[in-house]
Image (tube, grey):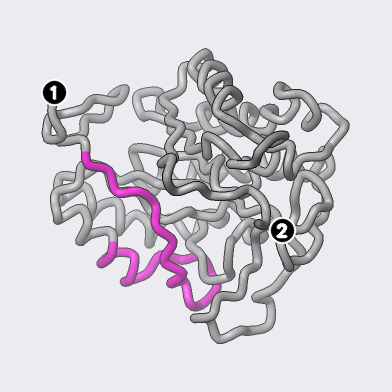
Amino acid sequence: MSLFSVLSLRGVELRNRIVVSPMCQYSCLERDGMANDWHLVHLGALARGGSALVFTEATAVEPCGRTAAVDLGLWDDRQIEPLQAVSRFIRRQGAVPGIQLAHAGRKAATVLSTMVERPGDRWTPVGPSPLAFGDKPVPSELDRDGIGRVVQAFSHATRRARDAGFEVVEIHAAHGYLVHQFLSPVSNRRTDAYGGSFQGRCRLLLEVVDAVRSVWPDDHPVFVRVSATDWVPSGGWDIDQSVELARLLGGASQNCGARQHPFFPISAHPA
């Protein structure tokens, strides 16, 4: 086995072990979440360069889940066709097209320094608890109906990803975004079934995984990206909980990975 040996994941074969991780491009300048020439050229070039698996950037499952208004999205059937062109080109270069599905939660609605702000670029974010991230607005706490809407949004986006020709789907449960916000005691102060205990804080992710798996081809893998630790002295998400979560996901027959470099911590909360 080497970096350049073939790797099989369920029914998907990678020509080597080189994977292009999701990288936000902030290039949907019309604020419509539509893939465009930028995404085709950017991701196509990476596939052409010899990588085996090429992921899109974090792709929002609903408009309020965008990190910024210029993020890629998959909350509407009209967004399928432009992504088909991207996945098709990646495949023609011998690589496997993958897509990361995400919801930014309380970290949404960022107005970047590179953006010319327009009306609608800011909105009230949502989260597990009414705790703001830094100087962002206090998020609206998701109720049971809101949580159900998020789970359905992941399911619908997965169906669209399937129809767009992607072969690997990754659930973004890291980097302080919504699913991570539910996992971490730092950002989740709920006292209902979606908070408190380890099992309660994992509930949203497990429901999302089940919803995604139910509409995703059985021979295609589902990845789960986690931040293995919050890097706080105490009281946060940590390695032991990540290990236990991996066991839970393994029991659900998922292909999952806890991926974070120990020298590059990504905080779930403001410093």
Q: Amino acid at mark 1?
A: Met
Considering only vertical position in the picture, is 105 above or below 211?
below
Tell me how far mark 2 sits from mark 1, CA to CA.
43 Å
- Secondary structure beneath dot 2 equals loop
Q: Which residues are magenta?
A: 18-42
Identify the residue at image location x=68%, y=82%: 119
Q: Mark 2–mark 1 contact, CB under 8 Å?
A: no
Q: Amino acid at mark 2?
A: Phe
Side of 206 relative to 144 (left or right): left
Identify the residue at image location x=72%, y=34%: 235
Side of 263 relative to 173 (left or right): left
Q: Quadrant of the N terminus?
A: top left
Side of 36 relative to 47 (left or right): right
Residue under pointer 2: 133
Side of 74 relative to 167 (left or right): right
Judging depth in this view, the residue of 214 and 96 nearest the camera is 96
Label the magenta part by its dominant secondary structure. loop
Q: Is residue 41 magenta?
A: yes
Could you tell me if residue 152 is visible in this image? no
Residue 234 position by quadrant: top right
Of the residues under marks 2 and 1, which one precedes in the sequence? 1
Residue under pointer 1: 1
Label placed on residue 254: none
